[in-house]
Each structure stands twice: as structure tokens, then as C-alpha cells.
Amino acid sequence: MSLLNGPRPTSGLTCWCQDMNVKSTAQEVCRRLREHYGETITTRRLEPVAELVLTILSQNTTDVLARRAYDRLRARYPDWEDVADADEAQLATTISSGGLSAVKAKRIRRALREIRERTGGLELEHLREMPLQEARRWLMSLHGVGPKTAAIVLLFSFGRPALPVDTHVWRVTRRLGLIPEGTSRERAHTLLESILDERCIYHLNHNLVRHGRSTCRARSPHCSSCFLNDLCVYGAGRAPESDGS
Ligand code: SF4
């Protein structure tokens, strides 16, 4: 058993980030993921408002369907002002391919209107230089924006060290013991960022998603062949023969 693979303290700490054992494990996990999957340099995908809208469209659907809904939205409403002022039912019809269209139309319209009211325009550039946690809180105060959506905008549009915790990141980091059992996905954002190096945050989302899809799958994870096994709380108790396909 690795020295890193000891029991993870869950009490007596005022902050998860004070747990040096967890921090050491997190560092080693990052290193191995980088070695195995490569170092993904996170680049800007879309301008911040576009990224925000695309991320809302991505909620509870696939990337492909979200992108299709986004392309239809941009074709019908080339200007964000048009989206903010659009008829909600028509907006929902336009983005229907992404699912939950009535909810998403309301979220998008309200978020854009809130941005316009607070900034006087439809852009988010003021967040670029704002302290990270303040920028996160600003985004999360918008209608329909939770920690994952805020982190996506901060990471992918602004290139800032925020970690989006999707279902793969949440599952794999829980199994590894990097966050305590029972941690909500919302809380996981803060806990993980508190134990990770900034450099690691830039590629961890991408690499954990790859690992979650290929090896640490929700059902039948391939623990016996996993290169993180000796670091993993869940994997340590799994015999090779218990692996499925
Ligand atoms: S050892 Fe198993 S549970 Fe742990 S990260 Fe690897 S596949 Fe996931």
C-alpha cells in the first residue's frame, strides 16, 4: 500500500485544505493523470456570455444536442439583446432540440437581463480581473447559474483556475477519497479547489472526465487495471475478479 493511501481524516480539521495527506494524494493523482492522458491546455472556447448561454443549454443533455440548440439560437437571434428581449415561448421553440426548453429559455432570458441591468450591457469582461471567488459569486448570483456553470465560464472563457465538477469528476474524486463521502456536488467545487495546485486545475476536469469514461465508470469500474489503484480508497477494497466489463 502506498504511503499516500492512508485513511483520510474527516474530522478535527477546520479546512479540508489543511489535510496534507489528501493534498499529497491529489498532487500525485494529477501527476499520473497528466502522464497518462497528457496535459490539456485549457483554451478559450467562446466569449463569456456565449459560454454561459451554451452551458445553460448543456444542462441535462448531451454536448451534441446542446450545440445544436445553441446554433439554432444564434441563427435566429444573432444579437444577445435579441435573446434577452425575445418572446419566451418562441425562444423555447428555437432551442427545443436541447430538451427542457421552457426552463432553459427562462433561465437564459433572465440571466441575460440581469447581466444587462447590472453592467449596462451584455458582456462579462469586468469578471476578468475580479478576484476568483468574487467572480464566482457574481456569476452564481445570476438566475439559473450554479457552481458548475460558473466554473465552466471562468475556466474555459477566462482561463481562470476554477474546476467544474461534473458527474465524472464528482464520482472519481469521491472514490479516490479526495472529497469526503456524502459531499454534495456543489460543495465539491470548493473542497477540491482548496487542495489542488493551480496548474493541476487547468487539466484536471478534462483528464478526470476521460478517466471516468474509460476506466472509473459509474458501474463496474476497472479497478484492477487502474493506474490510480494504490492511491484510491474505493479501489483498495476491490479484488481484481470483481471488475466487470
Ligand atoms: S481504482 Fe477503481 S475506483 Fe479508484 S480511480 Fe481507479 S477505477 Fe476508479
Image: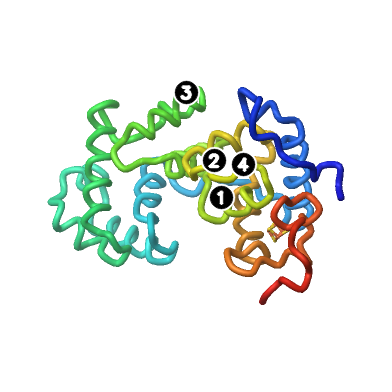
- Identified at 24% across, 53% down, the residue is 103
Q: Amino acid at mark 2?
A: Ala
- Identified at 26% across, 39% down, the residue is 112
Determine which residue is flagged by label 1: 170
Total label count? 4
Say whether disc 3 or disc 4 marks the residue closer to the N-terminus.
Answer: 3
| Way the structure is coloured | rainbow
Vertical comparison of 214 with 206: above or below: below
Q: Are marks 2 and 1 in contact (CB under 8 Å)?
A: yes
Tell me the SS state at disc 3: loop
Viewer-nearest of discs 3 and 4:
4
Counting from the top left corner in percent of width and height, residue 78 is at: 27, 52
Tell me the SS state at disc 4: loop
Tell me the SS state at disc 2: helix
Say whether disc 4 or disc 2 marks the residue closer to the N-terminus.
Answer: 4
Determine which residue is flagged by label 2: 188
Distance CA(mark 1)–CA(mark 3): 27 Å
Viewer-nearest of discs 1 and 4:
4
Vertical comparison of 152 with 13: above or below: below
Residue closest to the eye, 203 or 26 = 26
Say whether disc 1 or disc 3 marks the residue closer to the N-terminus.
Answer: 3
Determine which residue is flagged by label 3: 130
* Mark 4 residue crowding within 10 angstroms, few (<14) / some (14–19) / many (20+): many
Q: Amino acid at mark 1?
A: Trp
Counting from the top left corner in percent of width and height, residue 193 is at: 60, 35
Q: Amino acid at mark 4?
A: Ile
Q: Are marks 3 and 4 in contact (CB under 8 Å)?
A: no
